[in-house]
Amino acid sequence: MYPTRIALVCLARTACINAVMTSRGMQHIGMAFMLEPALRHLYPSPAKQATAFARYTGSSNTHPFLVPLYAGILLALEENIATGILPPTAVTSIRQPLATTLSALGDALFSGTLLPLWALVCVNLMLCGYIRQALVVSIILCIMQILFRISSFFYALRRGLATLVLLRQMDAINWADRLKIANALLTALALWHLPYSSVQPFPWPGCTLGMVSLLLAAWLVARLHFPRLLLWCAVFCAFLMDFSWAGM
């Protein structure tokens, strides 16, 4: 295992991976900076260090929330390479596919589901006048996100590629689809709390149609992978239509 100081330095540097981005290599400079303390520890010889750094000169890009987990897996592989358990090609063959897989998972679960869920929860709380509660929710989720980064890094550092088995067992992609249904309900709830909810008589037909449309759109995207662009076009066309029959 790596010394605690080196592991903590690598963990801290995962927050800097997007500080330098290039159109050719994406995160490859930040990746080298993040792994540098561990590679210098594993390979005291300058020649071996150069060979190790060369393994990360190619294009690399993954989701920021999963960078610590990604780094932990790479560090575990490098430790096995340094001890002779794995060949050097183990990293070069898996580095980019692993980054792409984690990027897709991060986009679906974090960017596409959990971040909108946090925003919608806070919007609904603020529309109800619970400003302090929205702030507390934000602080709690921020702390949970930091704890997730730390725990995923050390878990991947100890387990290596076995971490991917746990990710598969968690079934994160399907959980993202389920949470998108919750996001649709929260969106409908936010619309319910908008000022026009006090209009008399209340436009029940229009609100019912809107809620059904949101649920249908969430189901189409989650289950049938319906293109979001077409849904946005449908919404835009709907704004151009006359909904006076619905009280709107």
Image (cartoon, grey):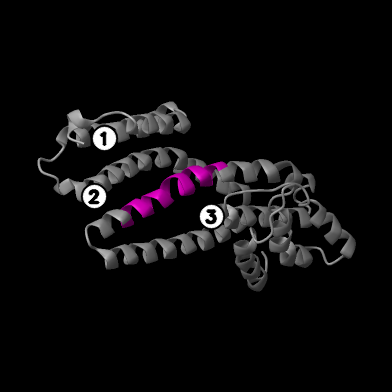
**Relative height, residue 87 to residue 143 (above, below):** above
Query: At x 62% / y 57%, what residue is drawn?
Result: 72
Q: Which residues are magenta?
A: 104-122
Count neighbours of disc 1 (C-alpha within 10 A) and say few if under 14, some if 14 to 19, many if 20 or more.
Answer: some
- State how many labels appear: 3
Question: Between marks 3 and 2, how big is the CA–CA gap?
Answer: 33 Å
Q: Do labels 3 and 2 touch, CB within 8 Å?
A: no
Mark 2 falls on what kind of element? Answer: loop
The residue beneath circle 1 is 210
Percent from the top left, x then y, of residue 16?
Answer: 63, 63
Residue 200 falls left or right of residue 75:
left
Percent from the top left, x then y, of residue 84?
Answer: 79, 53
As for residue 108 lying within the magenta part, the answer is yes
Confirm whether residue 132 shows in the render. Answer: yes
Magenta-colored segment: predominant secondary structure: helix
Question: Between marks 2 and 1, how big is the CA–CA gap?
Answer: 13 Å
Of badges 3 and 2, the one in the foreground is: 2
**Relative height, residue 7 to residue 101 (above, below):** below
Query: At x 37% / y 50%, what residue is drawn?
Result: 117
Percent from the top left, x then y, of residue 67?
Answer: 59, 55
Picture quadrant where residue 37 is located: bottom right
Q: Earlier in the sequence, mark 3 or mark 2?
A: 3
Q: Which of 59 and 23 lies nearest the eye of the viewer?
A: 23
Quarter of the image that includes the C terminus: top left
Q: Which of 246 and 45 lies nearest the eye of the viewer?
A: 246
The residue beneath circle 3 is 65
Q: Which mark is residue 194?
A: 2
Furthest residue in direction right, as rendered: 47
